Image: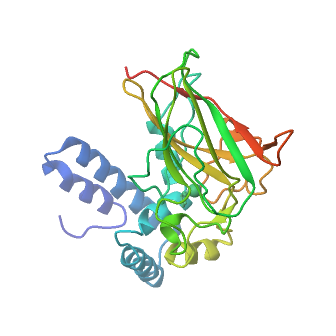
Amino acid sequence: MRNLTEANLTDAVVAKLATCPNPRLKQILTSIVRHAHAAVREVELTEAEWIEGIKFLTATGQKCDDKRQEFILLSDVLGVSMLMDAINHRKPTGATESTVLGPFYIEGAPDLPHGSDIAGKTPGEPTIVSGRVVTTDGKPIVGAVLDVWQTASNGLYSSQDPNQDLYNLRGRFRSDADGRYTFRTIKPVSYPVPTDGPVGDILRAMGRHPYRPAHIHFIVSAPGYEGVATHLFAEGDPYLESDAVFGVKDSLVVKFKPVAAGGSLEVQYDFGLKKVA
Ligand code: BEZ
Ligand code: FE
């Protein structure tokens, strides 16, 4: 293994994986090596560009801590997260489609009774969200857990905003004997993904905006069923066609309809869960 050239270097590196005892790791590393070499070859990467790339990845790692995961954000804005989501969550008819989890979920949101308001004093358009959790053939699922979170009207999640209580605009609800759930909140707003780190720099370098269309996050789960991490997006949002993380699906876009009497909005949505095989 000497005098390796542009023509045979990739195969030489892949051949080194012959000793890798874990077949799945071997498969993944072989693919990464082949694709990384192909990219370098295709663009004829310069040394200055390689250094820029190394600096970018270093800064991405340095931006991470126990609250901030800049690598996941990078995966999100490059569409890698949604590609994995599509591959890992192929849903049958009747099962609610999944979308990106995002970095702002926190465990331990309070269990709240049917009809509770998760917005407290947060300003915004009052909204009642209700519907059912059902099987793929439409039968009610009793006792499903709906873990809900969203931004305040300033576009920030409670975990990003020292002026909000930790569990503001978050809660866990359970479907009742008819599979029904209801909670009160405020209409979510569109907001930018964090742009104060390397991912913001690369979005600006690509000439892309950082916005996500307004949405409410849900993780819906029930024993014996495949849980789903998903969102409900607000119909009419200007960013539905250009979500910074590629997460929008038609089946998840809902109307925030004015309620005839009383000045609030209402959203109705039935979540479908697939039985575990
Ligand atoms: C979110 O919807 O909370 C989110 C998803 C991906 C990246 C940033 C935020
Ligand atoms: Fe979000």
At 51% from the left edge and 21% from the top edge, which residue is drawn? 177
Tell me where residue 34 appears, x and y as whole percent. Answer: 37, 55
In the rendered image, the vertical position of residue 12 relative to residue 136, given as above or below: below
Q: Is residue 158 left or right of residue 251?
A: left
At 30% from the left edge and 63% from the top edge, which residue is drawn? 9
Outermost residue on the right side: it is: 260
Q: Is residue 183 left or right of residue 68?
A: right
Tell me where residue 262 appears, x and y as whole percent. Answer: 82, 45
Number of callouts in the render? 0
Q: Nearer the viewer, residue 105 or 53?
A: 105
At 25% from the left edge and 59% from the top edge, which residue is drawn? 13
Q: Nearer the viewer, residue 182 or 217?
A: 182
The image quadrant of residue 257 is top right
In the rendered image, the vertical position of residue 93 relative to residue 207, given as above or below: above
In the rendered image, the vertical position of residue 135 relative to residue 44, given as above or below: above
Q: Nearer the viewer, residue 54 or 121?
A: 121
Q: Nearer the viewer, residue 139 or 260?
A: 260
The image quadrant of residue 251 is top right
The image quadrant of residue 27 is top left
At 44% from the left edge and 37% from the top edge, which residue is drawn? 88
In what quadrant of the picture does the N terminus appear? Answer: bottom left
Image region (quadrant) for ligand 1: bottom right
Tell me where residue 55 appears, x and y as whole percent. Answer: 41, 81
Q: Is residue 143 left or right of residue 244?
A: left
In the rendered image, the vertical position of residue 210 relative to residue 135, given as above or below: below
Q: Is residue 50 left or right of residue 126?
A: left
Outermost residue on the bottom side: it is: 48
